[in-house]
Structures are given as C-alpha cells and as structure tokens.
Image: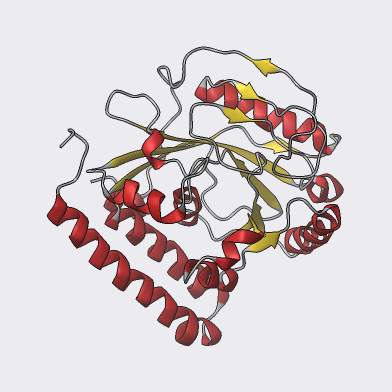
Amino acid sequence: MTRNQASYPTRVYRIFRLFFHLVYAVLAVACFQPNCSKARWMFFVRRWSLTLLNILNVRLNVKGAHPETTPANSILAPNHVSWLDIFMLYALYYTHFVAKIEVRAWPVIGWLCSNVGTLFIERMRRRDTARINQIINQALRSGDCVTIFPEGTTSDGTCIKAFHSSLLEPAVMLHSTLYPVALRYCDRDGGPNTEVAYAGETTLLESLLNILAQQEIDAELIFLAPISAQGKNRRELARAAETAIAGCLSLSVRRRKPGIPGGFPETLPTDFLPTDSPYPAPQDYPEVKDPALTSVRK
C-alpha cells in the first residue's frame, strides 16, 4: 500500500456512503426540487456537493479573488482535470455548467446533471454551439452565473490545453465579467496528482475507483483577477484567461494541430509554449476563509 492509498475497509465504507448520497440526490430532485425556491435549491446543491467532497476526503482550499456570492452576469472559466471539478465549484456557487452531450448518458449522474441546470453541447456541431450561446445569453441576462471549461476537454493536470473562444461570445455581447479559475490537484510532494484526472481513455468507473482508492486528495481553486469583457473580443478573452491560469500554475499551453478534432469547433494555430516544471511553489494568493468549507479541509 502506498502512503496515499486508502485501506480496503475505507474504500468499502466510502462506496456505501457514496451510494446512499446518490440516492439522497435522486430523491431530492424528484420530491424536493419541484416545490422549493431557487434560493433553497441553490443551498441544497452546495451542501450536497460539500458532503460529496467530504465522502471522497477531498481537502478543498480556495484562494484568490473569490466573490462572496454567486456573481451575476459572469462566466467562470476554469481549466479542466476531473469530474470532481464540477462539485468543487458547486461547493461555492450554484452555476450553470456547459458539458459535453455524452455526460447526459451517464447512469444516474447524467439525469442529475440534467435536473440541476447543466447545458449539454454537441461539441463537433457548429450549429449546436450557436444554440448553447443563445441559452448562455439568456442565463446571463437573467443574472445567473455560467461555468464553461474553455479547453473543451480534460487534461491530466500537467499542462493546459488551448482555450477555445466559441462559448465566450455572450460575454462579449453583454459586457460580462470573466473569472479565470486555476484548478489543481496536488500530491503530498506538491506535484500534480494525475490519479484524479479523468482524461485520455480512462472511463468514469475507473476514474471513480482511482479517487476512492486515495487516502486523501488535496485540491485548490485559485480565483484570479476578473476580466471585463467590455472592449474585448472573444478570442482576446480566451487568451487572457488561458495566460492567467497557465501563469498561475506554471504549466505549458498545448495547442492542437490543424486537422485534429478538439473540444469546441474552432481552428487554432499550432505552437507549444514551454514554461517551468509543473506546480512549482505557488504565488502567495490569500486563502479564502469560508466556514462552510471547513468540513472538507479536515
């Protein structure tokens, strides 16, 4: 057993807790959501996500320019490593996520995502991008917060994939605020914890088992300086967020080659920007003091 590997009884205990936690979510969506206010539902989603992180022993630390409440007319733009990313952000805010259409087919999880306001996109269809942009526009106009993963897919946490700008057009039109969020999972030596990643050929079940097998998971959300969309086009927004996150994590930006399908339908140039080794000593971002997060820092 490695030093960060959970014992077999611990894994079994977590599986049982996770099962009943999912059952609780299904019952809440079916019975509680239709008759509760938006504010109460937002509170429930946050508490449910915090408990999920606790079950998986995720030690979440939030740093940087973290808004105290769900930011209206704003887009959160984090890098993407794992399906855990979604619940770490849900632990802070109720936000509409944009996810690939394949997620909707996941057993139970797909149904739950559909019922908490997730926007599903067929990434390789340009027309579907236009449809999602219309929905994002409506959500921002109504004062909601939307979260997109500009990479369009996950990485293993050792690089940043080029940010696509196709879903940032509504931000430009409405002069929204873009919040770059640097997200990382660290091992005990401070390096990237690639076991958490849901990337490559890893299946959802394999990813879940890898996460359950770890004794603890150290995770960080670093909110960087917000970027106003006023006076910028969508590509400038994407590059500004990409540069900020890559610089914060000291990771290279990997751009796909022409002709190779990517996340969102957008042609990008080919280059590779080297930086220092992954996850050096981070900058001194202030840690957010949120009592609600105490339970997942133990």
Colour scheme of the picture: secondary structure
Query: What residue lies at 41% left-to-right and 74% top-to-bottom?
Result: 25
The correct choice, above or below, for 33 with respect to 167 in the image is: below
Q: What's the residue at 29%, 23% (across, down)?
A: 189
Q: How far from the left and from the top, in percent, is residue 246?
A: 59, 25
Residue 169 in the image: state x and y as whole percent: 83, 47
Q: Residue 139's image quarter?
A: bottom right
Visible in this render: residue 246? yes
Residue 256, placed above or below residue 35: above
- Please state, as top left, top right, bottom left or bottom right, where the N terminus lies in the image: top left
Residue 242's spot in the image, x, y percent? 66, 30
Q: Residue at x 79, y 33 (%)?
A: 259
Q: Is residue 245 visible?
A: no
Q: In the rendered view, would you say 225 is above or below 110?
A: above
Q: Where is residue 210 in the image (x, y as percent from the top left)?
A: 33, 46
Q: Residue at x 16, y 54 (%)?
A: 10
In-front residue for pair 291/234:
234
